[in-house]
Image (spheres, rainbow, N blue to C red):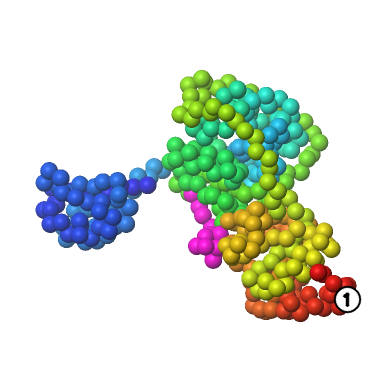
Amino acid sequence: MGELRINHDKCVVCKQCITACAFNALSVEDGHISVNSACRLCGSCVKKCPLHAIEIVEDRHVIDRDQYHDIMVIAEIDGSTIAPVSYELIGEALKLAAIRQDKVSVAVLGYQLDDMVKSLKGYGLDHIYVFDDPSLSIFRCDVFANVLYDFLSKRKDNVVLIPATLNGRSLAPSIAARFKTGLTADCTKLEMRENGDLVQIRPAFGGNIMAMILNSHARPQMATVREKVMDRAIYKNDDSGTIEKIMVEPSLLQSSVLVETVHDLPKASNISSATRIIVIGRGVPVSDHPRIHGLAKKLDATIGYTRPMVEKGIGSVLYQIGLSGRTVKADWILTLGVSGAIQFTAGMDQSSLILAINNDPNASIFNIAHHGMVADVSQWLDEWEKRYGSLQ
């Protein structure tokens, strides 16, 4: 971050900077140019000032990166178990840690955790930190952020990984803001450099590019990772991972949120856990949808949709695949009439077998498909029915 500074000794209040500002962030107060919170540090006023009386000063402190080591994973609880995405983050953390021989630890927050944390043993972890308190039985972002910031600020972790779940997406920025460090959300790939920099990779600009994001000037480096995009940690059947209970200061458990009642809603079914998937894209005529549903029934597969199809009202968002929908890791996935934009493929490219049918030989989906066929979907369905019978 930085700030806009005005040298009042040079400034003659010509107001050219006010005219140049598109955000109404500058005004005259008590005979001087004043800056308000609307400033976006765009630099327009700096360029416009004829006397060079305005500058943007970077508020960047230099860190000693050699002091920062190890990786911390913030586990999430799903009911009475550790959420599966936590094991995926542990698996990825172990791979990253091997580059520099770092240690991998896990922090778990909740109540009555003794049985749950035992399931984390044997995955190659160095430490398992447990915050067990009745006040942590319900997720409240301010309380969890208080506890974790207090804990992490006493350490020198190089990387902190948090699940990109509903809770994680609110918790991660709350912690990152307190550290004044960067946060990359919804990463689909992570790489570690020898100097300790974490390369955080995710689609950007509407899924048109894959951005490689670095946070070289602040620590810890923080990222959230979606479920189903990383490989689950391999159980080693050993006794690795010492469990340490951390006492929580009562002051950290004070919350501005009052929870009066808690209602457990039934979990809605979605496509995330499907192992066989057929995806309907824009290249499929609506008249062929019934036959595709028939095909899915014969193959015991689940129907998925791309974002444009959901926006047309054809499919449910619970069965939308992609970064704005669900991430899947199927045994096999068959895409029909799907172009293969990054926003979609980032949500399914970890599937074991990817099959694609599209009449455009240059469709991006063929870049990731294990087997592809350039064909009209309607004609392909006709041929299927000739060989194997009606799909209606």
The x and y percentages for residue 103 are: 64, 37
Whether the magenta-drawn stretch holds residue 307 is answered as no
The residue at 54%/66% (across/down) is 208
Amino acid at pointer 1: Arg
Front residue (pair 138, 57): 138
- Span shown in magenta: 203-215
**Hey, which quadrant is residue 329 in on the image?**
bottom right
The structure residue drawn at horizontal position 12% and vertical position 43%, both measured from the top left corner, is: 30
Residue 158 can be seen in this image: no
Residue 197, given in percent of the width and then of the height, sits at 54, 49
* Looking at the image, residue 182 lies above or below residue 244: below
Frontmost residue, 195 versus 130: 130
Q: How far across and down, in percent of the image, does residue 175 sit?
A: 49, 38
Find residue 123 and report its image quarter: top right
Q: Which residue is mark 1?
A: 387
Decide if residue 26 is in sight here: yes
